[in-house]
Every structure is written in C-alpha cells, then in structure tokens.
Amino acid sequence: MLRTSAYSSIRASLMKGRFQQSLLRTLAFLLSSLVHLCDFKSKKWRRSGDSRLKMLWIIRFSGFFSAALVTIVLSPSLQSFPPAEAIRSSHFDGYLRYPGQTPVVDSLNRFSFRKASAFGNAEECGSGDRQTSGETTVCDPSLVHIAITLDVEYLRGSIAAVHSILQHSLCPTNFFFHFLVSETNLETLVRSTFPQLNFKVYYFDPEIVRNLISTSVRQALEQPLNYARNYLADLLEPCVRRIIYLDSDLIVVDDVSKLWTTSLGSRTVGAPEYCHANFTKYFTDGFWSDKRLSGTFVGRKPCYFNTGVMVIDLVKWRRFEYTKRIERWMEIQKNSRIYELGSLPPFLLVFAGHVATIEHRWNQHGLGGDSVRGSCRDLHPGPVSLLHWSGSGKPWLRLDSNRPCPLDALWAPYDLYGPTP
Ligand SMILES: *[C@@H]1O[C@H](CO)[C@@H](O)[C@H](O)[C@H]1NC(C)=O
C-alpha cells in the first residue's frame, strides 16, 4: 500500500524538521478539502467504470493521501479537530474500498526481510522429533500456540516479535504461530524469513468489524486487525484450547513457554493487572453516570490490564460466548460514546476484575511513549520478560529517523528488515 513506505520516509523527514503545530493545522484543513474532492470523484469512477480516469486520480492524489496520514500521525492533538476527522475517515474508507488491489502487493514487494538463523529444540525438550515444519498438525496437544497479527504497517514489528520468541526459547519447534491477516496473503514472506516455523495464516475479514468500529483517539487503534483478538476463538481450530495473544510492537526476552504454562484458575483471560491505574479515565462521564451501563462493574474490583499480552482459555471463551459480549459493548459504543480508545475498553468491560493475574514482567508496556510529545519511557521496576512499545512511538520508526529512545536499542537486534548484508 502506498502509505506504508511513503509514509514512514515522509514521517522521518518531518520529524527532523519539527514542523509547527499551526502549519500542520493549516495543512490538515487544506488536505481535508482535497480528500473530500477525491472521495466525490471516487463515487463517480465506480459509476462510470473508466479505469484510466481512475488511475489518473489515484496517481494525482496518492501523495496527498500519504501526506494527510502523516499529518494526523504526527499530530495527535489534531485528532479532535474536525477536518482531521474527515481526512481520517475518508482515508480509512478508501483503504477498505479496494481490497486486494495492486497498492497492497506493490508495497509488499518493497518489503525485504532477511532469513532468520536456523533454530531447533534443545535435548531437554524430550520428544524432539518435530524437526521439520509441515509435519506438525495444529491439533498436536503438546504445542504452544501463539497468535500475532500481520498488519502491513506493523509487519516489521511482528517479524521482530517472532524472531525474539524463537531466540529465547528452549523448544522453539514446539511453538505454533497463528498469524492473522486481512490485507493480503503473507505466507510466502513468513516462510522465507522463518523456513522452519510451524505456522498458519488466517484471513480476518475487516467487514466483520467494519460496522462496529467507532473513531478513537488514535487512527492506528481503528485498524480492523486490532479487533481480530476478539475473534480468536472462532478463527482458530476448535482443537486449539489455549492461546497466547501478542501485539506486534513487542519483543520477548524470556522463554515464552513459561507464560504458556501460567495457571488461569477458573478465569478465561490472564494478563498483568495494574490496580493503581485510574480506571475511571478509560470510560466517559456519560458511561459512569448511566447506572445501566456502569452497573456492569458492580460486585467487581476492576483494574486496568493491557490487551497486548493475554493468555486466553479458548474453551471457556467459546462456552461463554465472550465474542458476543464484546460485540454488544461495541454496539453500545456506536450509539452512545462510552470510551475513547479502540479495542481495549470492551475487554475491560467484559473482563476487568475477572482476570487471572500474570506477573508484570510479561508486559513491560508503554515504551512507545507519550503520544503528544513522543517522549521516551523507562522500564517499570522489577524483572523483564517482555518489552512492549505500546503508545504512539514505535522503535523501528524512531531508529530509522535517528531519534531513538534508549530502550529502542533492545528492540534493534531482533529486526530482520532490510536486504541481506
Ligand atoms: C481519575 O480520573 C478521573 C477522570 O479523568 C478524575 O476525575 C479523577 O479525579 C481521577 N481520580 C484520581 C484518584 O486521580
């Protein structure tokens, strides 16, 4: 897709230039007018079916689209500004409007990942006969199941996450990766990067959530694939009884099989909890003042948890139909705004206070930093098994722009992006 590469390079150069907020506002306003014009044209194309005219408009406006996106990403404070909303939703619609068309393929051709070094099980792994992939069936009960999305914009992060998991585990061939995609089939890319990996690619249809997504404070939070975690129980084979769900902006620096064997007790979801965080702020005043809504927390002691690292009992999830419960809250959100973030609040609504506590070492989150100032964050006290760059800053973008945060150096060794040296 055009935005991915153009966007990161423009973003990097803009970061260096440190554009003034006021300039961005003006730019956003101008672009919104252009986007409206383009959107109007796009309706015309579909009626006329004139592909030459369509191409011309795509070429003419692709630059503007990228620039518009950059403006929004760079300036989160703009996001409550009406013209920015207009750009964002137009862009989003445009992106879903042409599924599987050349822009996606084109940008994928520009992705280049090095092959990861070979890996194998240690002797301690017992029946180490799972030496080659292909023979492993997903229903083998000894497997460790891990789900990660492969979003074109976060692909570099997802690949680094997988790489980090393999590097720190004793029995990597016991892992089975479930990759969720919605833009194109990335199987070849994964296979060439990790030739021995046990994995399967699942197509997540953006249409499933399209009508359930409401605008949030950050455009990245509206990506349909962000919501794929709600549907793991349906997407994965019924024989998969437990899954570790991981975000794309993290690295694991410990053996993930320790996380896999964590007891969930009677709970369905396990995650590190943060009970000192102000839980009130995740929902609107309207939510708290409507007892029919906020009454859902009565009898619970709800605490914030981050949905980027979760261990999920899929058997219980299916039995209690948690997907439907989450969808019901998303429908309420569409009609009466009860929160500002993306896929997280419905999880809090359904599970907060009913989560199996996992050690904090498994989600040292927030390393992406502050969304407005792009400031660097430090680790929380205590041991570290997983580093998570949640927040708006991503280590690959900061490294590319030569403005990394100190902890980004810990992400860099797992990066496989770029041609073979
Ligand atoms: C928690 O956040 C809410 C809403 O932002 C605020 O009104 C309240 O004072 C905060 N509570 C504490 C203890 O900081």
Image: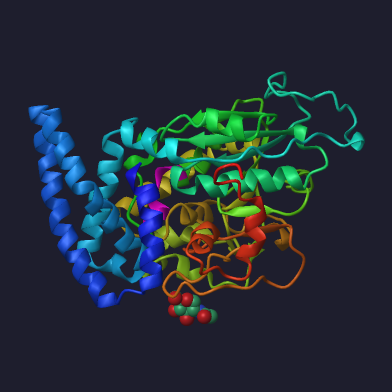
Pick the residue in front: 105 or 140.
Answer: 105
Pick the residue in front: 328 or 114.
Answer: 114
Pick the residue in front: 61 or 87.
Answer: 61
Q: Is residue 13 left or right of residue 397?
A: left
Q: Per the image, is 104 magenta? A: no
Q: Is residue 164 left or right of residue 255?
A: left
Q: How is the image coloured?
A: rainbow
Return the x and y of residue 216 as percentages of the image width and height.
36, 58
Return the x and y of residue 313 as percentages of the image width and height.
66, 40
Does the image show residue 358? yes
User: Residue 69 falls in which quadrant of the image?
Assistant: bottom left
Most prominent secondary structure in the magenta stretch?
Answer: helix
Does the image show residue 364? no
Q: Per the image, is 220 magenta? A: yes
The magenta span reads 219-225
Q: Is residue 143 left or right of residue 326?
A: right
Image height of 341 relative to 310, above or below: below
Q: Residue at x 76, y 27 (%)?
A: 141
- Quarter placement of the C terminus: top right
